[in-house]
Image (spheres, rainbow, N blue to C red):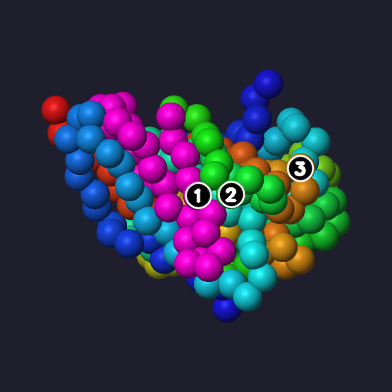
Amino acid sequence: NAGVTQTPKFQVLKTGQSMTLQCAQDMNHEYMSWYRQDPGMGLRLIHYSVGAGITDQGEVPNGYNVSRSTTEDFPLRLLSAAPSQTSVYFCASSYVKWHEAFFGQGTRLTVV
Amino acid sequence: AQSVTQLGSHVSVSEGALVLLRCNYSSSVPPYLFWYVQYPNQGLQLLLKYTTGATLVKGINGFEAEFKKSETSFHLTKPSAHMSDAAEYFCAVTPEGGQGNLIFGKGTKLSVKP
């Protein structure tokens, strides 16, 4: 049972480039979310989804887009990367929105 | 807005000593409460959670936490620290009836001295 899988684990982007961070879960969880982790800031919610076809913004959504076409996948898109988006990104899923969240291993993104 | 405060960004204890990591939350409605642990270069792993019922919650690796509504606290304790407990610990809440997203504290890095 893989749980929550994030790819890639590491990525370096140039300012202005675009990319998609992939997240997939095999637990049939309805609720999925993306967080970014910055030193001394804890984890902050970027976007979340309560089911296929439904997404909403979190605390820090600017510069990021998401979609949820299937229950399993919840990709995060950076359309035009900025140095301020240098961070560690975590995807999480849970059975329902207030249950225990299972986290992926993270994607460490550097924007130069 | 909901918030979570973890007192002390760094805590250092000796091996065998008591571990106490503090967490206070702001909420007008009793929330669901969680403690997560993050080992270096890894994702977060659930240590324990409080939803309803008994206010003293036992988790993995010998950790426990007590929900005190009157103090809006959910402090994490372990009677005897082990070297393997060195990690960063995050307290989180998800308000009942809210959107369900986790609101995290800023984390407490625990060091264990031999």
Comparing marks 3 and 1, which lies closer to the viewer?
A: 1
| Element on which disc 1 rests | strand
Residue B67 point in image, percent of width and height: 54, 54
Asked if marks 1 and 2 touch (Cβ < 8 Å), the reply is yes
- Residue bearing the label numbered 3: A95
| Element on which disc 2 rests | loop
Tag 3: amino acid: Tyr
Comparing marks 3 and 2, which lies closer to the viewer?
A: 2
- Residue bearing the label numbered 1: B66
Q: Relative to B59, say whether B21 is above or below.
A: below
User: Residue drawn at (47%, 39%), measured in percent from left and top?
Assistant: B64
Mark 1 burial class by Cα count in 10 Å: few <14, some 14-19, many 20+: some
User: Residue drawn at (64%, 65%), measured in percent from left and top?
Assistant: B30
Mark 2 burial class by Cα count in 10 Å: few <14, some 14-19, many 20+: some
Residue B75 point in image, percent of width and height: 43, 52
Q: Residue furthest left?
A: B114
Q: Nearer the viewer, residue B20 or B91?
A: B20
Residue A21 point in image, percent of width and height: 58, 47
Q: Is residue A104 left or right of residue A70?
A: left
User: Residue drawn at (74%, 53%), measured in percent from left and top?
Assistant: A97
What is the magenta range?
B62-89
| Element on which disc 3 rests | loop
Q: Which mark is residue B55?
A: 2
Residue B57 inside the magenta-drawn segment: no
